[in-house]
Amino acid sequence: MRMRAQLQPRIGGPAEQPWVTQAIQRQPQLANPTEGADLARTIVSIGLVVLLGIGLLLILGFSAVLLPAGPIVILLAAIPLLFIMLMVWWFDRWKPQPILLLVACLLWGAVASIIMTLVAQVIGITALALAGIDASGDVLGAVVFAPLFEESTKGVFLVVIVLAARKYFEGPLDGWVYGSLIGAGFAFTENLLYLSSSFEEAALGGLAMTFVMRGVMSPLLHSTFVVCHGLSIGFAARRGQWWLVVLMWFPGLIAGMFLHALWNGTATIVGSLGLLSLVIMVGLSAIMSGFWLGSGLLLRRNESIHTRQSLGDYANAGWLTHGEVDMLGTWKGRRAGKRWANQYPGALPEMRRLIRKSADLASIRTRVLAGIGGEKEREVEKYELDQFVKIRTNMMRRVQQPQGFNPAMRR
């Protein structure tokens, strides 16, 4: 049985009729209860993106000038990065996250986590050396230090997001998206080093081989590792308080470390087996990449189901019709709605805003049902419902015809 939380009925009674047959009513002006916090988050995000962006430009500049075959290396490293970015964009279409936040995730992986990892490794190796332990070997570094430090520095940004911008981290799909971009950014910078080293050691042949191995056969590994963090945090974010969300990072962190250590350890063990080594590593990469892709597809489908369930509460309270729930809560309905709106000047942008706002409302309803945010979250819900009504009213004014949206026109 679905949990219920008190929802204020729509003034004027249930919205039983289609949009354009409903009377256009004046709604009371409500203030945005999160306006100040949103502004602060935007300012901090811009500052972070600018700072990390400068860091990336420095990395690219030094790479182009100092690394062997620098421009070619940058181009090759960018190919898997662009592929992952396009895939993430496709998965993120149901409820797109702020561009600024997505860019911040990418830059965090490419710049901040790289720097933090290098610093942590130096400190760790030095500390062990002072204790009389030689930790400079390749095996220990690959199987222990790399998973420990790299996954920690990548995943910690997900914790920062969920604490500072909970409204943008509301479920496992959000964690999947953010984690994929952080991992992709990290892999990009790491590929710069591996590709340039291979060119220096074996010229174009070594460069081509490394690109095939890292950019073609295993481009999704770092994204897969960090997705484990994002899924764990995302499931907790949908229902839990902030302390539980932070606590639930650790299962995902451990899972990401395990997969990372498994990959590096397997590569170390089978490295001398020739062709069999290649078969084993490609198979392991396919399994991990399949997990990345399969989890993304499943979460994308579940997100639309979750939206329909949450919007159903608003339909029961009279804020929209159940036909509108079907339209706003399915890919087929959204496409039909946009085709319909495109027939009228100025209606299509309002339809897109309505679709986006409905996804926001679905997330807010989930937080209210989970008791997250308390009374303030209910105020946010009232404000967003008010905005939803205003957007729909603007749609009605632009359409100005008696039929309205007819679900039967969907195809």
Image (cartoon, helix red, strand yellow):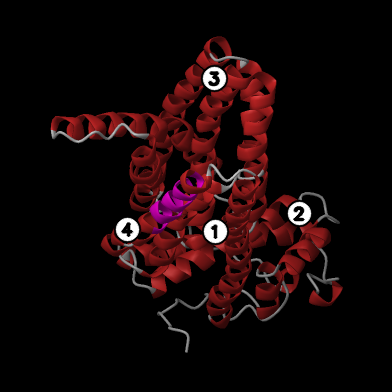
| C-alpha span from label 4 to label 2 | 46 Å
SS for dot 1 = helix
Q: Which residue is mark 3?
A: 60
Is residue 19 located in the magenta-colored stretch of the structure?
no
Can you tell which quarter of the image residue 297 is in? bottom right
Q: Are the residues flagged by discs 1 and 3 in contact, CB closer than 8 Å?
A: no
* Sequence-first tag of 3 and 2: 3
Q: Nearer the viewer, mark 1 or mark 3?
A: 3
Residue 293 seen from this side: yes
Position of 376 relative to 206 (above/below): below
Q: Nearer the viewer, mark 1 or mark 4?
A: 4
Q: Which residues are magenta?
A: 255-267
SS for dot 2 = helix
Can you tell which quarter of the image residue 407 is in? bottom right
* Sequence-first tag of 2 and 1: 2
Q: Which of these two is toward me, 25 or 307?
A: 307
* Sequence-first tag of 1 and 3: 3
| C-alpha span from label 3 to label 4 | 33 Å
Q: Are the residues flagged by discs 2 and 1 in contact, CB closer than 8 Å?
A: no
- Where in the figure is residue 303, as x and y percent of width and height? 58, 67
- Where in the figure is residue 383, as x and y percent of width and height? 46, 60
Callout 1 environment at 10 Å: few (<14), some (14 to 19), or many (20+)?
some
Which residue occupies 41% across, 45% down? Answer: 38
Position of 382 relative to 204 (above/below): below
